[in-house]
Amino acid sequence: MIKKVIGVFAVLISQPVLSATIAGEYQGEFNGFLRVDNGSLPNHYLVWLGVGSGSCGGETHINNKEIRLKDNRLVFNWKLRNRSCTTEIEFKNESAEVTDTCITPESEEGSTCALMGQYIKDVTDNK
């Protein structure tokens, strides 16, 4: 019995403190929108990243994919033609930073369709 209690306690304390607070909606610097919901497993999150408004409104980059949180980051691998790409979402406090190996800030400069950059959590959500 003591081994079971110790095992459960070890699992509980191994969960990152931040993981309980990242669920919610985030607004990007331009028209980007990020939604993070709790996933079906501990430390997993259902992620939607896309353009919330403007001429590209509704376009998605990550469409409800379940991703495991590791070191305060969600990492999503995808393909662009024959090229492997990685989108990384790093969480700090009430914000998220979105970067991608195939999408550069320069390629999005001045675009209303931009997805990369800083996102601020909508704290009125209470999620």
Image (cartoon, rainbow, N blue to C red):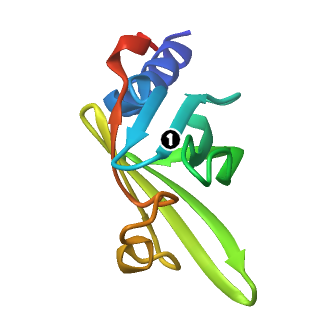
Left or right, 27 with respect to 8, comes to left
Residue pictured at 28% horizontal, 31% vertical: 94
Q: Position of residue 64 (x, y in %)?
A: 71, 41
Residue pictured at 45% horizontal, 19% vertical: 6
Image quadrant in which the N terminus is located: top right
Residue located beneath label 1 in the image? 33
Q: Is residue 79 above or below residue 3?
A: below
Question: Closest to the observer: 86 or 108?
Answer: 108
Crowd band around label 1 with a 10 angstrom C-alpha radius: few (<14), some (14–19), many (20+): many
Left or right, 8 with respect to 63, comes to left
Question: Closest to the observer: 88 or 13?
Answer: 88
Residue pictured at 49% horizontal, 13% vertical: 5
Q: Is residue 79 above or below residue 45?
A: below
Question: Closest to the observer: 63 or 45?
Answer: 63
Q: Position of residue 113 (x, y in %)?
A: 52, 59
Q: What is the residue that sits farthest to the left in this orientation?
A: 93
